[in-house]
Amino acid sequence: MGVFMQAWYRSRALYDAVMKLVKAGKFDEAMKLAGGIPDGSVRSKAVNGIVVEMAKEGEDYRDALDRAIETALSTKNPTKNLMGLAFEFLEMGKFDDALYIAEHITDLANRSKVQAEVALRLARKGELDRAMKLIEDILDEDVKTWATSMLASEL
């Protein structure tokens, strides 16, 4: 078995152990263990899983969120890891956190997609002014046009 495969199997085993700690509510231990996962994308997935669960449990997840962002940024595919995290927070209705994560996405089209999704969800909740402001701030013109037409069709 090559070094790469060993690292991958070790990463998977550590990931599973991290998720068991998360289910038991042992977030600090989970975070320490996650830091030792050799594979960057598996490490990012683990830290994302920890912060999402902390948020769901009503724990203070501020530091964990920053750690998740840092971890994602250190991977080969930061956009994918950050998008996944942003959409998890979007699903929980934590729009400000989703936007905060999006600020760290360097890929403009993908950052804009998160901003557009937040805007449309705000509009559905009746927060039209905030939704319109968010859409105005979208830098990717194609996404801005799409979001504007989606907003118009929702009204």
Image: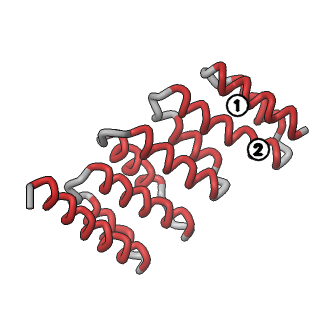
Q: Residue at x 73, y 29 (%)?
A: 146
SS label for mark 1 = helix
Answer left or right for 120 relative to 97.
Answer: right
Mark carried by residue 62:
none
Placement of 49 over or under 111, stated as above or below: below
User: In the visual, does 12 lie left or right of 2?
Assistant: right
**Amino acid type, callout 1:** Leu
Pointer 1: what residue? 134
Quadrant of res 7: bottom left
Residue 142 or 47: which is nearer the viewer?
Answer: 142
Question: Which image quadrant for residue 109?
Answer: top right
Q: CA distance from mark 1 to mark 2?
A: 10 Å
Here the colouring is secondary structure
Tell me the crowding category of disc 2: few under 14, some 14 to 19, or many 20 or more residues within 10 angstroms, Cα based: some
Q: How crowded is the residue under tag 1: few (<14 C-alpha within 10 Å), some, or many (20+)?
A: many
Question: Relative to 22, is 109 above or below?
Answer: above
Q: Which residue is mark 2?
A: 122
